[in-house]
Image: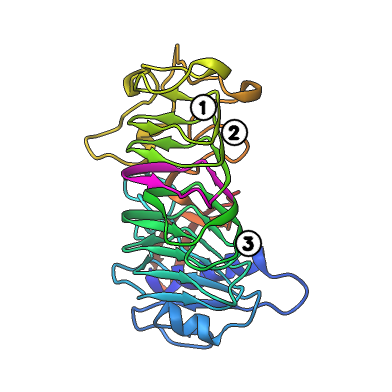
Amino acid sequence: MKKLYVPLLALLLSAATLPAEAQTIRRVNNSGITGTNIYATAQAAHDAAVAGDVIQLEPSGTSYGTLNFTKNVSVVGPGYFLGLNAGLQANPASALLDNVYFSSGSNGASLAGVTVNAYIYIGASNVTVQRNYLPGGYIYTGYANGTNNLNIRQNYIYGLYTYSAGANNVLVTNNIFTSGGISLNAATNGEFVNNVVLASINIDNFNVRNNYFASTFQPNNNLYSYNLSAQPGFTTANNNQNNVPQTAVFTLAPGFTQFDAWYQLKAGTNPARGTGAGGADIGAFGGNTPYKLSGLPAIPSIYQFNQTLSGNTLNVNLGTRSNN
């Protein structure tokens, strides 16, 4: 089954992402599969790539190592929590990286659908970190001076911090932040929209709207509107609401393991439903770019795969879907 499934996924990805001009899909697989444009580590695939290439990290229980971006390439994995959110991928395994660095030369690069075991350091501009899972590490902005136009969206993240330097025009939207907290210094500015924050937060110079805050919020030089807080934390002007418990907003289910599906809005009367700016829902699943369960990247996926052998005939039942 494995030998057939992986090439099919690569073919689907190629069909979805290759334009008329040259662009290469570089596969990363550490299970012993070899061939043209197949690599055992993410760094080896990156180093062989040219600007505009797509690097596909295939499902594996073994990390593909540390990745240092120095080129404008796109790295995609299969998503995460695939065993908890059933029916999204035929193979429930994730693709793992350790530390990730966006270094000089990587302006415009992106990372999506990957579980990052350690940290992400952003030291380049126009970088997109989208639909990733950081179980115990931070995303660090300002890893170098002069970073601008960062897009941090639809991730399930332990925490977000400024490394040292500031960063301009940082869009932080539709993320779920767990227990690590958020601290962005006064030299960092941007938009903080439609997030769920379960730990403490301290930010400056942001437009803060349509968020749910479960813990303490340090009010600094921000604009606040249409936010919900579990605490009696900040002014109720501009349609902010205080003392709203998680149980009034989120499903907090299924099961006993906390994961992204818990932070969908519960049915029925809900203070987060339709009460955001412009009538949007508050939280990660609302707004213009709603959180995507399991961080499925915006490429086709195989969600169903069965094969049977009848005599000399191999019968394959394959289900695919596009993702946005």
How far is mark 3 from mark 2, CA to CA? 22 Å
Image quarter where the N terminus lies is: bottom left
Circle 1: element type: loop
Expressed as whole percent of the image width and height from the top left, the position of residue 142 reads 49, 61
Q: Which residue in the structure is indicated by mark 1?
A: 282
Magenta span: helix, strand or loop, mainly?
Answer: strand
Quadrant in which residue 146 is drawn: bottom right
179 or 34: nearer the eye?
179
**Residue placed at 35% from the left, 79% from the top?**
30
**Residue placed at 39% from the left, 45% from the top?**
182
Is 318 situated above or below 233?
A: below
Query: Label 1 crowding class (10 Å Cα cut-off): few <14, some 14-19, many 20+?
Result: many
**Residue placed at 41% from the left, 62% from the top?**
307
Circle 2: element type: loop
124 or 279: nearer the eye?
124
Q: Is residue 179 magenta?
A: yes
Q: Earlier in the sequence, mark 3 or mark 2?
A: 3
Q: Nearer the viewer, mark 1 or mark 3?
A: 3
Inspect the image, locate mark 1, and give the three-letter code of the amino acid beneath it: Ile
Which disc, if any, is residue 126? 3
Q: Which residue in the structure is indicated by mark 2?
A: 287
Which residues lie in the magenta part? 170-188
